[in-house]
Amino acid sequence: MAILKFRAYFEEDDSIYRDIAVKHTQSFLDLHFIILKSFEFDNKHQATFYRSNDKWQRGREISIEKYDKPYKAEPLIMSVTTVGSEIRNPNEKFIYVYDFARGWTFLVELISVSKDENPKLTYPAIIRSEGIAPSQYGTKSILGDRFVDVEEKYDLTKGVDGFSEEGDDDDATDDTSAEENGTDDKEEV
């Protein structure tokens, strides 16, 4: 059984990517779920794949559900379309779009094909993670208005008792002058 290894790049920063392995008989729905898992996204929104070329232009769509597009070919359906059936060349590319309102876009590229199945893995599998995944909803939406309170409560730009701005030293004494005078200005504990 062929194992297909894909690299899914975050479109806005190609240093953020996940390597994913799938069996050629698994569906695009399986690929969809493992991409979401690898970037720590939830599964609450619509998604679609597009076949692509070397210039990352969108081609035939592979959608979660069937819908009519009057001017384009009917999309393939993720749950019944196997990943292996859409591999035409060794550098096959797909564009994956998740949450149409926010437009999360990932560039998915086939990076290797092997016949060796790793018995320790459950496919589909995340093989490698590079970079910090973008926050799906942003930090503020997770914490709500309380996040602003936390920022204001702990204003780290002001000096605090015993601590000061960088370069200032409130608690420092002139140790050299005390030593030269033979006195010790420091208190003994």
Image: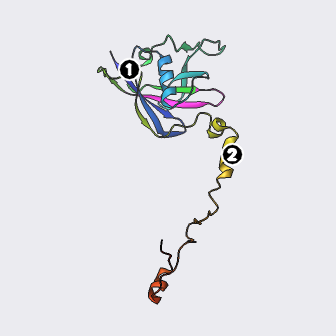
Bounds of the magenta span? 98-111
Please, is residue 168 above or below residue 22 in the view?
Answer: below
Is residue 99 found inside the magenta-colored segment of the image? yes
Q: Quadrant of the N terminus?
A: top left
Label whose residue precedes the other's in the sequence (1 or 2): 1
- Give the main secondary structure of the magenta stretch: strand
The residue that mark 1 highlights is 122
Is residue 116 found inside the magenta-colored segment of the image? no
Residue type beneath disc 2: Val
Q: Position of residue 94 (x, y in %)?
A: 49, 25
Which mark is on residue 148? 2
Please, is residue 2 above or below residue 181 in the view?
Answer: above
Mark whose residue sits in front, 1 or 2: 2
Q: Position of residue 115 (x, y in %)?
A: 30, 19
The residue that appears at 65% across and 47% down in the rendered structure is: 150
The residue that appears at 42% across and 21% down in the rendered structure is: 124
* SS at circle 2: helix
**Furthest-front residue in this view:** 189
Please, is residue 91 above or below residue 72 in the view?
Answer: below
Q: Quadrant of residue 82?
A: top left
Q: Quadrant of residue 65?
A: top right
